[in-house]
Image (spheres, rainbow, N blue to C red):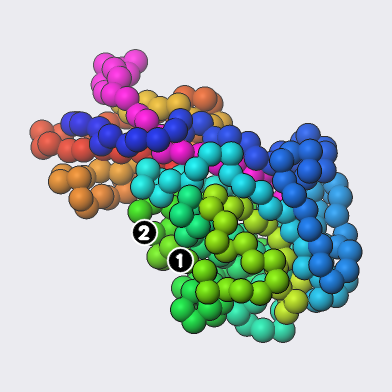
Amino acid sequence: MALAGLPGSSSRAQVLWDSDRGIVPAEQGWDYLALGGPAATGPADGAFELDTTATAAIQAGMFRLAPAPLDRGAGFAVELEFALLAESHSRTERAGFSLIVLDQEARGIELAFQPDAVFAQTAEPLFTRGEEAAWPGGTERRRVTLTMRGERYRLHVDGVPILEGPVRAYWAFAGLFDVYETPNFLFLGDDTTSASARVRLWTVRLAGPPRPALVRGGDGGVELRWEATPGMWYGVERSRDLRTWERVATVEAGGEVATWPLPATGSPRFFRVTVP
């Protein structure tokens, strides 16, 4: 048994937004912008609420640069807890709530959330409906994790993978509020005049690739152990050749250290831990 080396930062997530702090976005490193009219914002049920349902003309959201370069080669994850309470749209390829994550090369993905679906925005042609999946969240609070590694992204909801596809470059866009050539860029909100939404946001966290170690467990067996973020999901993957990987477990960290017992096997295997 061996570990696959993964360069990069600690897997312990950096908190980028925490509604428990009870302060406005600007006091947590985020900028806020509203176009086409004022959006309703403020605390609600322990969360930060953004409501653009007064009129579809309103575009509003939070944005910032990541505190460290977003390196797809090493892999990283952006995790948020939110509830999509209401959403309406006049065009099927638009949604009232979107997540934009661009890496250090200004390549990444824009995901759009509707009451029954989540889908990727394409780059060629620009901003049409790409790969999609049923949205399992309803109006309940959900933990959504977007991971990027190499040329692919993957979306998990409460630890379950529901959508994946290629990262994209939206550099052809040249309209108002053109952010798509901005490296390490993050956006949450309503970026279209064709839809509106009411969303509650609890947390946003950023994590780099985990760095597991092989240690002897209390029962005498061998286990993987890594620095973790409490409540965050991690994936354990296995390979024979370091090229093809198989997911063998999904682990929710109960504390600042997570573990997973390695199965007894006589065959050589490589293991790695991913987020999630």
Q: Which residues are magenta?
A: 199-222
Give the camera-side residue of 10 and 270. Answer: 10
The quadrant the C terminus occupies is top left
Nearer-the-camera pick, 177 or 99: 177
Q: Which mark is residue 168?
A: 1
Residue 112 picture location, percent across and down: 60, 68
Crowdedness of circle 1 by 10 Å Cα count: few (<14), some, many (20+)? many
Vertical placement of residue 89 versus 191, above or below: below
* 214 drawn magenta: yes
Is disc 1 placed on a helix, strand or loop? loop
Under mark 2, the amino acid is Glu
- The residue indicated by pointer 2 is 151
Q: Is residue 123 left or right of residue 88?
A: left
Residue 80 is left or right of residue 164, and the answer is right
Give the camera-side residue of 103 and 230.
Answer: 103
Q: Nearer the viewer, residue 178 or 14?
A: 178
> Three-letter amino acid code at disc 1?
Arg
At 80% from the left edge and 76% from the top edge, which residue is drawn?
56
Quadrant of residue 191 within the rendered picture: bottom right
The answer to whether any part of residue 198 appears in the image is no
**In the image, which disc is placed on residue 261?**
none
Asked if labels 2 and 1 touch by Cβ distance under 8 angstroms, the answer is no
